[in-house]
Image (cartoon, grey):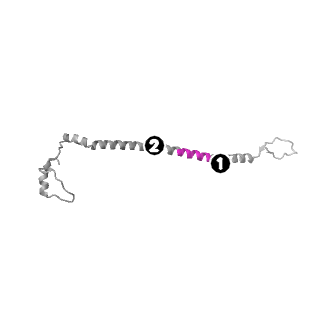
Amino acid sequence: MIRFATPPVDRASGWRNQSLVRERDGRRARFLGRALVCMVMLGAPIGVYVYQQMLYSRVQYDIDALRKTHDRFVQAEMHLREHRARLESLARVESVAPTLGLAPPVPEKVLVVEVGQTPSRNLMARVEGPHVPGR
């Protein structure tokens, strides 16, 4: 409902045109305020839910990336273990030894020492033989 306030008319001077002044109606503002509060109250849980889902998705992507990285590291470790086993194999060492100038020891130069025994210096000097440069 719209109300108009008009100043009183002086009857003695006759009718004159007066400007109409509209009164402020607070009902519409209250209605809009209540509607806004209701929309915020209904929208806040939806916003929180969407935010949590977004964080959940981001964490899932991070977990997937870490799993892929872990799988790559496991595969690289298996490859390195296999490579080390090939390098340490006795057949390979025996095949490479002659090219490096290595030969089986002469039986006279082999010294077997029991655990806890210390060989004498004379025996060690005799077994070692002359000094070879580079050793």
- In the image, what residue type sits under mark 2? Ala
Tag 1: amino acid: Met
Name the one closer to the observer, 66 or 103: 103
* Label 2 close to label 1 by CB (< 8 Å): no
Residue extent of the magenta highlight: 44-56
Image disc number at residue 65: 2
Q: Position of residue 123 (x, y in %)?
A: 12, 55
Residue 52 counted in the magenta span: yes
Instruction: Say how many tags the image has.
Output: 2
Residue 102 quadrant:
top left
The residue positioned 72% from the left and 48% from the top of the image is 30
Q: Residue at 39%, 44% (x, y): give it.
A: 74
Frontmost residue, 82 versus 57? 82
- Which secondary structure lies at badge 1? helix
Q: Is residue 98 left or right of residue 80?
A: left
Location of the N terminus by quadrant is top right
Identify the residue at image location x=14%, y=50%: 109
Q: Is residue 124 magenta?
A: no
Position in image of residue 131 (x %, y %): 13, 50
* Quadrant hosting residue 14: top right
Residue 7 got which mark? none
**Residue matched to label 1:** 41
Q: Is residue 23 left or right of residue 50?
A: right
Pointer 1: residues within 10 angstroms few (<14), some, or many (20+)?
few
- Residue 113 in percent (x, y) is at 18, 55
For the residues marked 2 and 1, what is the alpha-carbon distance in whole angstroms?
37 Å
Q: Residues within 10 Å of mark 2 (few under 14, many from 20)?
A: few
Closer to us: 67 or 5: 67
Residue at 13% in and 57% down: 121
